[in-house]
Amino acid sequence: MKLIFKNTEIFYSAKGIGNPIVFLHGFLESSKIWDPYVAELSQNRKVICIDLPGHGQSGVIDDVHTMELMADVIRRVMEHLEINSAGFVGHSMGGYVCLSFCERYPEMVRSLVLMNSTPEEDSEERKQNRDRAVDLIRRNKQAYVKMAISNLLTPENNQKFGKEIRKIKDEALKFPIEGIIAALKGMKIRTDKMEVLKDFEGYKLIIAGEKDPVLDYTILKIKAVHCETEIKSLPDGHLSYLENFQEVQQMMHFID
């Protein structure tokens, strides 16, 4: 299904009835990553999966896709579906969007799950890496996409989940360069959301990979304590929804 936001098509899916939950994918991903979860979860609740701007089948809205802009896209989808509040699950960049949504529209958030994500803003080193990524993708989109996705897993899991990773890469290669760059720029300028997470009074959870190449697991545990947020540890990398499907699926039943 699709709707129009700022003259741009936004694609989403909605399946099931009652007790809505919104799933938001990460950078270089689409709502398809949640497909394995939808059939079971939608038996007992409405499951909404959204392609964030410049990803999947959603169009590019602007030169920079801030987390706040993406949060407004989510609100537009919810209003279209006549949903007043929902649980939220965000993977990586999707977690950043969840936190921005929670900051802007707290009354619409019942629960919050950050998967392989952090409430912290980018470090200076990370910001520089974003700039280098923009330069690289302009020179060689294919090389950047393949490298960036492979770097999210250990070499062992790249091999173990080779078929699934190839599908993610093939789809990401279809995304417009402008959309990928807009997301990189938006993540670079996002603000710290530690206090937003700490102040949120609903159910909140961080799902963390002990071998995550992107996020330091030890630091993330410390941040979770500061934000008074439960943390569940998994033994693999940055793609817990894929690497640890059974464990994550079980966690989804205890949201709310």
Image (cartoon, grey):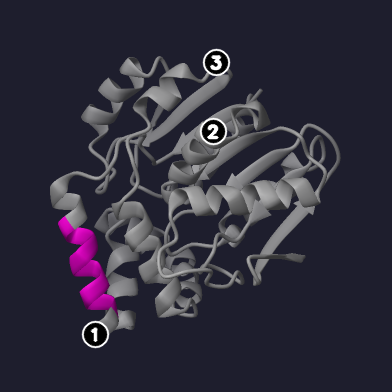
Between disc 3 and disc 2, whose residue precedes? Answer: 2
Q: Which residues are magenta?
A: 128-137
- Circle 3 residues within 10 Å: few <14, some 14–19, many ≥20: some
Mark 2 secondary-structure assignment: helix
Q: Is residue 191 above or below residue 106?
A: below
Measured in 3D between alpha carbons, the distance from the residue under mark 1 to the one under mark 3, in whole angstroms, is 45 Å
Q: Is residue 134 above or below residue 220?
A: below
- Circle 2 residues within 10 Å: few <14, some 14–19, many ≥20: many
Between disc 1 and disc 2, whose residue precedes? Answer: 2
Residue 136 x %, y %: 22, 76
Residue 61 x %, y %: 53, 69
Residue matched to label 2: 102
Classified by dominant secondary structure, the portion drawn in magenta counts as: helix
Q: Quick one: 55 or 5, which is closer to the camera?
A: 5
Mark 3 secondary-structure assignment: loop
The residue that appears at 30% across and 24% down in the rendered structure is 223
The residue that appears at 15% across and 48% down in the rendered structure is 124
